[in-house]
Image (cartoon, rainbow, N blue to C red):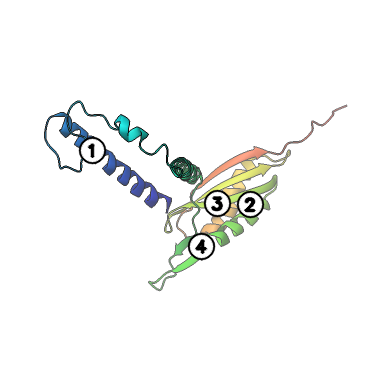
């Protein structure tokens, strides 16, 4: 969804900039444009002194200007936050063997994979997110390691057990995974 919004917004902004910039360039070169075009010649300005002061004395002018600017700021913040949020895969297509296929909810696969990874020795907590495409999902796994957990052993068990189980149960040929490990904060143990 956000990709479509990005393309539409960029297309509209680009089209507006192209039309306005091209019109200003053509006017600056001395070509006459229709009468509704705001620029008349090479020495013309974007807003004349009369245009700039025309609405100042009206009571509705400043509230409208502030409201439009507030809406623009809120839309820009929404767009920025939408860019920072990672897309979550909502469903996975599975080849059921009958030619039609089946659909598996992404949250169900995330939950099953999360339960398998949380049960590994040396893992205190795990968070799993699916990304990618419906036919080629990718797992993003964050593991919170206990102090005694060995990262190499946990990654081997994750690959051999949890990811293999998820691949086989979902009927996937492959399930690439990006794993991030983080240690649990704990006090140092005193050795005597």
- The secondary element bearing badge 3 is classed as strand
Residue topped by disc 3? 129
Residue topped by disc 4? 170
Which is more N-terminal, label 2 or label 1? Answer: 1
Distance Cα–Cα, label 4 vs label 1: 62 Å
Where is residue 68 shown, x and y percent of the image? 44, 44
Residue topped by disc 1? 38
Give the foreground label among 1 and 3. 1
Distance Cα–Cα, label 1 vs label 2: 64 Å
Q: In the depicted view, which residue is nearer to us: 148 or 102?
A: 102
Q: Residue furthest bottom?
A: 98
- The secondary element bearing badge 1 is classed as loop
Where is residue 144 shown, x and y percent of the image? 66, 43
Q: In the depicted view, which residue is nearer to us: 136 or 52?
A: 52
On screen, residue 123 versus residue 17, left or right, reads right
- The secondary element bearing badge 4 is classed as helix
- The secondary element bearing badge 2 is classed as helix
Distance Cα–Cα, label 4 vs label 2: 16 Å
Residue topped by disc 2? 117
Residue in the picture at 64% in, 48% down: 126
Distance Cα–Cα, label 1 vs label 3: 52 Å
Density class for disc 4 (Cα within 10 Å; few <14, some 14-19, many ≥20) is some
Q: In the depicted view, which residue is nearer to us: 106 or 1?
A: 1
Which is more N-terminal, label 3 or label 1? Answer: 1
Which is more N-terminal, label 3 or label 4? Answer: 3
Give the foreground label among 1 and 2. 1
Density class for disc 1 (Cα within 10 Å; few <14, some 14-19, many ≥20) is some
Q: Residue furthest front?
A: 57
Which is more N-terminal, label 1 or label 4? Answer: 1
Check if mark 4's residue and mark 2's residue have beta carbons within 8 Å.
no
């Amino acid at each position: 969804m956000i990709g479509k919004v990005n393309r539409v917004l960029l297309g509209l902004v680009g089209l507006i900039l192209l039309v306005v910039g091209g019109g200003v360039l053509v006017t600056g070169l001395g070509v006459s444009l229709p009468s509704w075009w705001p620029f008349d010649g090479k020495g013309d300005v974007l807003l004349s002194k009369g245009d700039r002061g025309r609405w100042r004395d009206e009571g509705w002018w400043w509230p409208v200007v502030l409201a439009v600017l507030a809406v623009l700021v809120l839309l820009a913040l929404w767009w920025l936050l939408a860019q920072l949020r990672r897309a979550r895969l909502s469903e996975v297509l599975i080849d059921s063997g009958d030619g039609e296929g089946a659909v598996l909810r992404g949250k169900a696969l995330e939950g099953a994979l999360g339960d398998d990874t949380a049960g590994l020795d040396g893992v205190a907590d795990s968070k799993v997110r699916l990304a990618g495409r419906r036919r080629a999902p990718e797992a993003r796994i964050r593991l919170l390691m206990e102090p005694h957990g060995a990262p190499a052993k946990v990654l081997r068990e994750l690959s051999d057990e949890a990811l293999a189980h998820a691949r086989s149960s979902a009927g996937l040929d492959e399930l690439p995974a990006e794993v991030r490990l983080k240690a649990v904060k704990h006090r140092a143990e005193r050795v005597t």
